[in-house]
């Protein structure tokens, strides 16, 4: 079980979240631009330190402000897929996946599961955007991560490809016994994929509120403070 209770102040927003995600489940982070979705996922990855709180995976503490504990990214054993794929352009699809895994059987298995086994010997510039994101997901899973972080991985794809990859991710999560944290602006996408959903408000720092209240927030920012919105059964 991944348990997250963190707070962080940014120049234009305040982040304060408290949620958990079990193995084999997907928690979606949604909310307006600037609300802190990527900051939260970077904190989980060990790339950005919160101001206070705790991050725990099972009995292992990754961050605890009271105990001054901070586990760096390289020791968290995470899979991380970004908006834009991070594949190596000079390697084939198969070698990209194998880069983080020495087990050839596991590499072949992941290529099969994600439907790109026939592209194994292709260079990454020779395949489509959707196929590159499948390869990036396979690469992230190849090292057998403890947690999978997905930061708007489908946002740059066309509608049809995005819909196909949603279906594949929903199918795949049932076979993964790890927590999956998924960042998206798309509420319909979040509802389709998520076992739980965390809506983030655009919370203005107190020092700026007297200035900000002169101009009302847009409808897109009218989210309630961060909380668990639903749990599917």
Image (cartoon, rainbow, N blue to C red):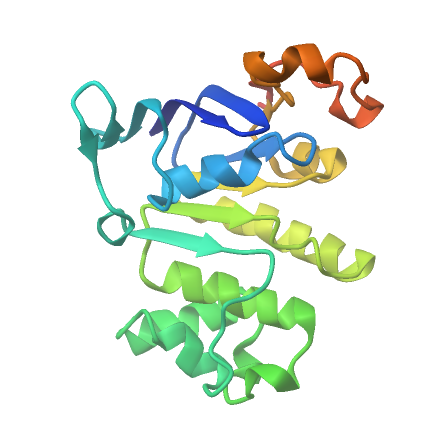
- Residue 52 in percent (x, y) is at 33, 21
Quadrant of residue 195 in the image? top right
- Residue 125 in percent (x, y) is at 62, 84
Q: Nearer the viewer, residue 148 or 116?
A: 148
Above-or-below relation of 43 to 154:
above
- The total number of labels drawn is 0
Residue at figure coordinates x 57%, y 25% from the top left: 13
- Residue 191 in percent (x, y) is at 69, 32
Q: Quadrant of the N terminus?
A: top left
Work out whether residue 25 can be spotted: no
Q: Nearer the viewer, residue 19 or 212?
A: 212
Residue at figure coordinates x 59%, y 71% from the top left: 132
Residue at figure coordinates x 38%, y 25% from the top left: 4
Work out whether residue 54 can be spotted: yes
Above-or-below relation of 21 to 110:
above
Q: Is residue 190 left or right of residue 60?
A: right
Q: Is residue 146 left or right of residue 85?
A: left
Above-or-below relation of 130 to 215:
below
Residue at figure coordinates x 57%, y 23% from the top left: 233
- Residue 187 in percent (x, y) is at 73, 33
């Amino acid at each position: 079980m991944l348990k997250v209770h963190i707070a962080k102040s940014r120049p234009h927003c305040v982040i304060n979240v408290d949620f958990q995600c079990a193995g084999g489940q997907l928690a979606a982070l949604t909310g307006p631009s600037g609300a802190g979705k990527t900051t939260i996922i970077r904190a989980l990855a060990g790339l950005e330190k919160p101001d206070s709180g705790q991050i725990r995976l099972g009995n292992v503490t990754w961050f605890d402000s009271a105990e001054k504990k901070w586990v760096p990214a390289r020791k968290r054993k995470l899979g991380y897929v970004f908006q834009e794929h991070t594949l190596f352009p000079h390697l084939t699809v198969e070698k990209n996946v194998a880069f983080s895994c020495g087990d050839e059987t596991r590499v072949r298995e992941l290529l099969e599961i994600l439907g790109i086994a026939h592209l194994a010997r292709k260079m990454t510039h020779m395949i489509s955007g959707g196929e590159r994101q499948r390869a990036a997901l396979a690469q992230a899973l190849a090292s057998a991560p403890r947690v999978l972080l997905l930061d708007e991985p489908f946002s740059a794809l066309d509608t049809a490809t995005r819909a196909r990859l949603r279906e594949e991710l929903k199918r795949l999560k049932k076979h993964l016994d790890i927590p999956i944290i998924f960042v998206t602006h798309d509420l319909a996408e979040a509802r389709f994929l998520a076992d739980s959903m965390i809506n983030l408000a655009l919370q203005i720092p107190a020092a700026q509120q007297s200035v900000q209240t002169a101009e009302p927030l847009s409808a897109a920012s009218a989210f309630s403070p961060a909380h668990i919105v639903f749990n599917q059964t």
